[in-house]
Image: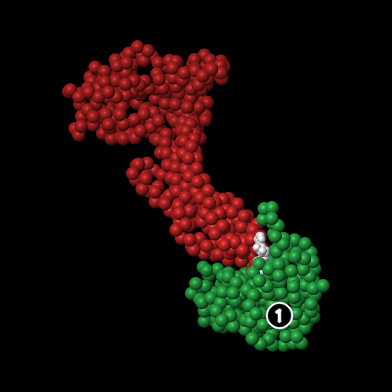
Chain colours: A green, B red
Amino acid sequence: MSSPAAPATGEPLIELDGTSKTYRSGEIEVAALRPTTLRIDSGEFVAIMGPSGSGKSTLMNVLGCLDVATAGTYRLAGADVGALSEVELAEIRNRRIGFVFQQFNLLASMPAWRNVELPLCYAGVARAERRERALAALDRVGLADRSDHRPGELSGGQQQRVAVARALVTEPALLLADEPTGNLDSTATADVLGLLTELHATGRTVVLITHEDDVAAAAGRVVRLHDGTVVSDEPNRPGAHRARKVLS
Amino acid sequence: MNWWETIRTGYDAVRAHRLRSALTMLGILIGIAAVMLTVGLGLGAQATIGAQINSLGSNLLVVTPGSATTNGVRGGQGSAATLTLADATALADPQVAPDVAGVAPTVQRPGPLAVAGTNWTTSVVGTTEDWSQVRARTVSNGRFLTAEDVSGKAAVVVLGSTTASELFGEENAVGRTVTVSGVPMTVVGILDPGGSSPLGDQDDQAVVPISVAAERIFGGAARTTVQTIFVQAQSTEALSAAHQEVSQLLLAMHRITDPTAPDFTITTQQSILDIANSITGALTAVLSGIAGISLLVGGIGVMNIMLVSVTERIREIGLRKALGATPTVIRRQFLVEAAVLGLAGGIAGVVVGIAGSAALSNALGQPIVVSPSATLLALAVSIGIGLLFGVYPASRAARLAPIDALRSE
Ligand SMILES: Nc1ncnc2c1ncn2[C@@H]1O[C@H](COP(=O)(O)OP(=O)(O)O)[C@@H](O)[C@H]1O
Ligand SMILES: [Mg+2]
């Protein structure tokens, strides 16, 4: 897994400041994410690692504006996410963030291209352009010939590539992938990682959650979580990428 | 996402669960079809009764003894014997009542008819020669009563078509003799069929000169008083003038000074029609109300299925939200889906309603009126029901937090 020269610009894209997330189920409170301070710059490729239950998904949900932090602030591209309305959050998810989930999360009733065009529907893009862009995105992940197939007719690796196409179709600045290779075999894993690496090379910020070391090797920086706390944050290959340890 | 795409998405979702959607639509279908049938039956009955009332004659006023209300107390209409032959004669005077075209005083009682061993009890009507014109009845065979029959107290009778066939079967009755309450009379004519009316079966009666009925058949009070005076106005426009003239003349004849307390009642076809319409209208409303309940049940079915749909597609909702769908868009999607369900059920209901109306009206021999406006209304109602019962499930979907929706299994 080689990582091309990452064009990290030094502009902060993600700034967490004392951000935490506590779940309450009945009487019991679970601190899924303890107060965390973390900065990810535009153009970085960061892997977030940690054992199961360490808060990786919780962190990604907060980063992806899918969930609201319990305390602390989260600034995305300078904007305080906590102050945004639900509609504004929807717009941010739509325009700035692309998601890739472990479960693919494709709609089974729709052919691949219509799954890919979905974010464009919510962005108000005209029909003809949507189809064109969806097909181009599918072409980019090497599935041009599968555009009319439904998810059920595709292999897991192909489904995840459709999901990657859906994540990149809006040209978002930030790509969030939560264990995207968790359900894939090694060939499909290589395919998906290759795509993420390529996207990173074209200037996108990629945050990749995984618990596999060889997957994390694709990233330029590795943040390790344990029990909801960042326990280490270091460049993957010292000197190759700009990285910083924000943890005080 | 524009409306058209939202509708398409809704349609796709409905199609994705064919059986479930079809069963949901069945509820709406039955409701819409039931409402269409009951309303159609009501309108059909109204049309039939309207036609029957119109068949009583044209521009008809019906004068009956007694007042509808006397000094605020409801008097028995028709109970008093206040109308006389003299009243009828006066009304027929073109000088006094220029807007009156014809006057037919009648006395009417059941009476036994007999022909060589065959007995038949029917309604014996004593009247004058004007009756056929005033009541818009024609004679198919022979002739109607003449002025000479009435003044000469001729023992002649005109039979309704049913009466004639009961007594004489297929044979020609004209010229034959029939005893009416023991009085032998010669049949001079047979009435054309007139169907049934609010005044009874128009085809089962024996019409005789009023003079004969009064003196030889009924006797007693029938000698001078009459039960009903049918008055025909010159035209529809002259109807209210004729009404006025009849009223004033009778008040004068009966020496009544207070015009608000007459001892007679004048009924117009319109007023009969109004009463009939209010009865059929009330009946239709009750029946449609019952049918409407099935529509309500159908609507609850839509709500039920939409709630299931929201629960089942919670991950889809979460995904759509993650991809940028706002609560408004999600709400609209589920609302449209519910409306598509409702509309599809409504269209099917209208089709079944129209087919059912045709079949039922054949079976009952009763017209069922399916009006285009009622059909459009039914469709609008079915969409409305979809929307109404979709609101709650749709806002539930819209309110879901994206992450809760995404994480659920
Ligand atoms: N909705 C929730 N309610 C309660 N606890 C939760 C919820 N989601 C996650 N948690 C808890 O928070 C912790 C972190 O979960 P998560 O972020 O999913 O871990 P990871 O993705 O690293 O496996 C776990 O202990 C988990 O049980
Ligand atoms: Mg996880």
Quarter residue B7 falls in: bottom right
Q: Quarter of the image containing the C terminus of chain B? A: bottom right
B364 or A127, which lies in front?
A127
Which residue: 61% across, 64% down? B406
Measuring 70% from the left and 57% from the top, which residue is drawn there? Answer: A29
Instruction: Write the residue at 79% across / 79% down.
Output: A244
Figure label count = 1
Asked whether the viewer can see residue B285, the reply is yes
Residue visible at 38% across and 32% down in the picture:
B197
Location of the N terminus of chain B by quadrant is bottom right
For the question of whether residue B347 can be seen, the reply is: no
Left or right: residue A239 compared with residue A134? right
**Relative vertical location of residue B201 with respect to residue B152 in this rendering, above or below:** below
Judged from this view, the residue extending furthest toward the right is A248
- Residue closest to the eye, A170 or B245: A170
> x and y percent of residue B176 in the render?
20, 26
Question: What is the crowding at mark 1: few (fewer than 14 residues within 10 Å), some, or many (at least 20)?
Answer: many
- Is A97 drawn above or below residue B119 in the view shown? below
Q: Position of residue B364 (x, y in %)?
A: 35, 41
Query: Percent x, y for residue A1?
Result: 64, 86
Callout 1 secondary element: strand
Instruction: Report x, y in % for residue B75.
Output: 49, 17
In this view, the residue farthest toward the top is: B220
For badge 1, the amino acid type reads Phe
Residue under label 1: A45
